[in-house]
Image: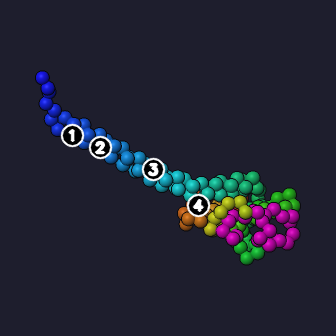
Amino acid sequence: MKKQSHSIEVLFPAVLLLLFATLAIMVVIFSAKTYQHMAERASENYTTRTALNYVTQKVRHNDVQNHVLINTFDGHKALILQGDGYATYLYAYDGSLYELYLLDGAEASAASGTAVLDLSSFDANWAEDGLLHISCTDSGGSLSDTCISLQSSQQKGNS
C-alpha cells in the first residue's frame, strides 16, 4: 500500500525553516548596527576622556601653590603648569590638544608643541578658588568636561 502524502506535510516545515532563517538574518543585521553604533560612541568617548584624564594627571602632578596658571600662549588660551625652572603648556591648536615643555622665559610658537590627541577645542577656567574647570570637544562635536580640586590654594585672578 502506498501512503498518500499531503502538501501540508512538506509545506509546513519549509515555511517554518524559511521563517527561522529570516528571523536569524534580521537578528544579525540589527546586532551589527547596534555594535557599530556602540563602537562609534566608545571611540568618541575615548578621545575626550583620555584628554581629560591626561590633563587632570598633569595638573595633579604640578599641584603646588601658584604653579597652575591660565594665560594666553601665542594667541591661544593655555593651561600653564610651572615648576623647577620649566613650564608645561597645554592648549588647543590645529585640531589637536598640544603640549609644550619649555624652559621658563624661553620663546616658542604654538606649532612647536607636540600633538597629544585630536580635539577641536580645549578650555580651562577657574570655577572658583582652587577649583579648575577643564572642557574639551572632540572632532565629532562631543563635549566633555571635568573639575579638578587643587590641594594648594590658587589665586582666582590668574585667569
Label located before the other in sequence (3 or 2): 2
- Indicate which label's residue lies in the foreground, 3 or 4: 3
The kind of residue tagged 4 is: Asp
Q: On the image, numbered disc 2 is attached to which residue?
A: 18
As rendered, which of 80 and 16 lies closer to the eye? Answer: 16
Query: Can residue 98 be found in the magenta stretch?
Result: yes
Which residues are drawn in magenta? 93-114
Of the image marks 1 and 4, the number of the one nearer the N terminus: 1
Q: Position of residue 119 (x, y in %)?
A: 64, 64
Q: Three-letter amino acid code at disc 1?
A: Leu
- Amino acid type at circle 2 is Leu
Which image quarter: residue 4? Answer: top left
- For label 1, the residue is 11
Q: Residues within 10 Å of mark 3 (few under 14, many from 20)?
A: few
Dot 3 corresponds to which residue?
32
Q: Of label 3 and label 4, which has the lower sequence position?
A: 3
Query: In the image, what residue occupies the spot 87% across and 69% down?
Result: 106
* Circle 3: residue type: Ala
Q: Secondary structure at mark 4?
A: strand
Q: Disc 4 designates what residue?
A: 145
Please state if 23 lies on the left or on the right of 64 as rendered.
left
Q: Earlier in the sequence, mark 3 or mark 1?
A: 1
Give the percent coordinates (x, y) of residue 115. 73, 63
Which residue is at 76% across, 55% downward? 62
Alpha-carbon span between mark 3 and mark 2? 21 Å
Alpha carbon distance from label 1 to label 4:
61 Å
Sequence-first tag of 4 and 2: 2
Foreground label between 1 and 4:
1
Front tag of 1 and 2: 1
